[in-house]
Image (cartoon, helix red, strand yellow):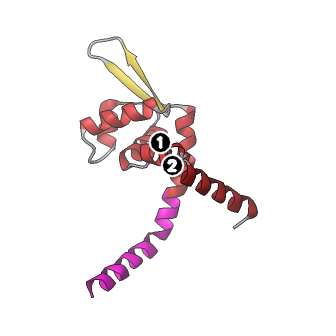
Amino acid sequence: MAGYQKIMKKEISKKCENDRDDCPVKDVLNRVGDKWSMLTVIMLSDHGTLRFNELHRLIDGISQRMLTVTLKTLEADGLLKRKMYQQIPPKVEYTLTSLGESLVVPLMTLYDWANAHMPAIKAARAKFGKAAAT
């Protein structure tokens, strides 16, 4: 590991040990680490501005209530903006902010890592399961 990365890793570790309530990694992962937030950010990044029902159709398995909660959370964190049009029926659109767009690169890095290492992870799980069963 490069020297800079080693120093940063130590700083992050120390910050999260000494001030657990103010750990930036924990705070961000608690907010966007769930699958719905990540999928919502990725869908908005890929498709651009979307309406609620468009997002609901694109994110397989999410309930309307969970999508509503997820969108409110992402908006509260400044990752997306909500634009409401004064018309009947109401029209609401969601778009990633520049902060939200900046999250896409680390999400895709995590996706690439998970995709590349999934065979090894599955093999480790299978080995662990066999060992635990004996």
Q: Is residue 72 left or right of residue 23?
A: left
The C terminus - image quarter:
bottom left
Q: Is residue 12 left or right of residue 48?
A: right
How many numbered marks are there?
2
The N terminus - image quarter:
bottom right
Disc number for residue 20 = 2
**Which residue lies at the image location 70% right of the left edge and 59% below the top edge?**
7
Of 131 and 58, which appears nearest the observer? 131
Residue 50: name its quadrant.
Answer: top left
**Which residue lies at the image location 47% right of the left edge and 64% below the top edge?**
115
How far from the left and from the top, in percent, is residue 14? 61, 55
In the rendered structure, are the residues bearing label 1 and label 2 in contact, judged by CB atoms less than 8 Å apart? no
Q: Hey, which residue is sitting farthest front in the picture?
A: 18
Which stretch is magenta?
111-134
Circle 1 sits on which residue? 46
Of 130 and 113, which appears nearest the observer? 130
How far from the left and from the top, in percent, is residue 46? 47, 42
Residue 109: name its quadrant.
Answer: bottom right
Residue 119 within the magenta-colored segment of the rendering:
yes
Mark 2 crowd level (few <14, some 14–19, many ≥20, 10 Å Cα)? few
Residue 88 within the magenta-colored segment of the rendering:
no
Dot 2 falls on a residue whose secondary structure is helix
Q: Is residue 87 left or right of residue 94?
A: left
**Which residue lies at the image location 49% right of the left edge and 49% below the top edge?**
26
- Disc 1 from disc 2: Cα separation: 34 Å
Q: Main secondary structure of the magenta part?
A: helix
Q: Amino acid at mark 1?
A: Asp
Q: Is residue 35 above or below residue 6?
A: above
